[in-house]
Image: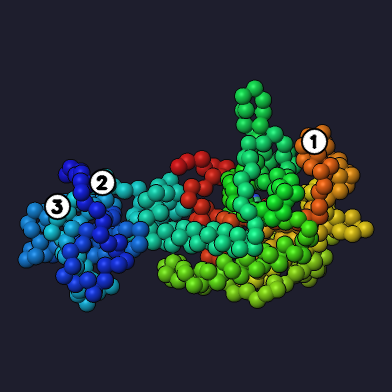
Amino acid sequence: MSVEFLGDWRRTHYSSVVTPDLDGVEVTVFGWIQDIRDHGNIIFLTLSDKEGLIQITGTRRNTPPEVMEKMKSLSRQSAIGVKGVVSARVEAPRGVEVIPREIKVLGLASHPLPLDPTGRVHAEIDVRLDARILDLRRPEPRAIFKVRHKVVSAIREYLDEQGFIEVHTPKIIATAAEGGAALFPVDYFNSRAYLAQSPELYKEELITVFEKVYEIGTYFRAEESHTRRHLNEFISVDVEEAFVDYGDVMKLQEDLLAYVLRKLSDECMDQLNILKVNLPKIVLPLKRYKYSEIVDQLNKNGYRLEWGEDLSTSAYRVLGKIHRNEFYFIIDWPTETRPFYVKPKGDSSQTCEAFDLMYEWLEITSGGSRVDRKEQMVERLRKQGLDPANFEFHLKTYDYGMPPHAGWGLGLDRLLMALLRIGNIREVVLFPRDRFRLTP
Ligand code: ATP
Ligand code: MG
C-alpha cells in the first residue's frame, strides 16, 4: 500500500463533534486507526484523533468496493483521512458513525508494533517507555497529559492573577544553589559549568526588582538514587515574593492548590473518568504540623527518629499511613536539614522558617523564609562548608537593598502524582530521564 498526498483535504470535524444530529452531513476526519474489525460484508475502523474516537463503518451496500478493499488492507495505527457521510445509528459507539466514500492513507504503521496501543495486552513500564510515542496513544496517558496541561495553565492563571510575573533564569550556571553533590557538569568552552538544580538564587535576586516572580522550568539533579519519586530532570514551579514570610507563601501555596483542584473538577471530568480517579479533597487551611510533632507521630507509630534527623524514605512511608488522603504542611524544620538560604527562626537558630507541602508520603513542595542579612548568609554558607567567594554575585545583591522575602519550589511532576494518585513519577512525564534511561 502506498502513502497518498494530503492535497486539498482538510479536516471539517474532530471526532468529538461528530454527533448523531449531523446525520446525513458530509465530513472529513483525520486520525490514527486504533482498531479494525473485518466481518466480510461490513468493516469497522475505530479512528482516534486528539479529541477522541469515531467509528468508520464500511458496508458492501453503501461503500465503494475500492474503499472496502483499502479498509481491509490498512494496518492499525496508520494515519488516514476519511471523507464520508455521518449516520446516526444507536448501535454505534456514541450513537454515530461515518460511512466512508473516500479514504486517504497518509502515514503507514509497520507491524508488528512493539506494544498494543489499545492497552488490551498489558506491557511493563519499561517496554512502554521504550515505545513511548505509541504508548502515549493509549487513552490513559493522553488523559494524564491533558490534566497536566490544565494544571500548568491553572497555575499560570492563578499566579498572574495574584500579580506575579513569569521569569526565565539560566539553566547553565557556574555555582550550585543546593550544594555541589548532585550537579551535572557541562563542558562550557574552556571551563566547567553545571546544569541548574533550581532557580533559587536568581529568583531571590529578582524579587528586589519585580517583588513577585515565578518560574516554571526544567531542573537537573545528578542523584544516583532510583526511586519512584525522583528523576534526574524534572519540572519545578518556583515562586518568590518580597516583604513576606513563610506563613504568607504557605497560604499562597494552599490557595493555589485549591484553585488547581477546582479547575480540574470543572474542566477535566472526562480525563478523570478515563483515569478512574477522584480528586483528593482539601479543607483550608491545611494542617500545619511542626517537625517536632512529626517526630512524635513517627515515634508513636513505631518509627524511631531523633529530633534533628532528616526524614528517610521509610519514615515518609510511615507518615503516608498516618496521613492518608491528606495534603498537609510540615513546618519549622531543624536548620541543619535545610539549605543555607533558609532563614533560622527568631533568636533560636536550631529551627528555621521552612516548610514542606506533603501529600501522604510524598513531598510536593519545599519553601521558607530566606536569609535576608548578608552577614548571616556568609555565616550560613561557611557552616554548610561552602565558599562565600563562589557566591560573590549573589552576595552583592545584599548590598543593593535586600528585603525580607520568602518562596517555594513545587515539583510539578510530584503534584501530578498526588492529584491523580499515581505511584510512579515516570507515568506523568512524557520522556523521563533517570539513572538508567536517557532515551527516547
Ligand atoms: P527529595 O527530598 O524528595 O529528594 P528535595 O527536598 O531534595 O526532594 P527540593 O530541593 O526541596 O527537593 O526541591 C523542591 C521540590 O522539587 C521537591 O519538593 C520536589 O517536589 C521536586 N523535586 C526535587 N528533586 C526532584 C527529583 N529528583 N525528581 C522530581 N522532583 C523533584
Ligand atoms: Mg525539599
Q: Quadrant of residue 248?
A: bottom right
Q: Is mark 1 within 8 Å of ligand 1?
A: no
Q: How many marks?
A: 3
122 is higher (above) or lower (below) than 261: above
Q: Residue at x 92, y 58 (%)?
A: 348
- The CA span between labels 3 and 2 is 14 Å
Q: Tell me the amino acid under the disc marked 1.
A: Glu
Q: Nearer the viewer, residue 334 or 51?
A: 51
Give the labeled residue for mark 1.
392
Q: Depth-wise, is mark 3 or mark 1 nearer the camera?
A: 1
**Quadrant the C terminus occupies:** top left
Give the x, y percent position of residue 222.
Answer: 64, 41
- Judged from the image, the secondary structure of the residue bearing numbered disc 1 is helix
Residue 360 seen in this snapshot: no
Q: What is the crowding at mark 1: few (fewer than 14 residues within 10 Å), some, or many (at least 20)?
A: few
Say whether marks 3 and 1 touch (CB < 8 Å). Answer: no
Furthest residue in direction right, as rendered: 347
Give the labeled residue for mark 2.
107
Give the x, y percent position of residue 286.
Answer: 70, 72
Say whether marks 3 and 2 touch (CB < 8 Å). Answer: no
- Lower sequence index among marks 2 and 1: 2
186 lies left or right of 346: left
Q: Nearer the viewer, residue 357 or 423?
A: 357
Give the x, y percent position of residue 340.
Answer: 80, 47
Q: Quadrant of residue 269?
A: bottom left
434 is higher (above) or lower (below) than 49: above
Q: Is mark 3 within 8 Å of ligand 1?
A: no
Q: Quadrant of residue 246?
A: bottom right
110 is higher (above) or lower (below) than 38: above
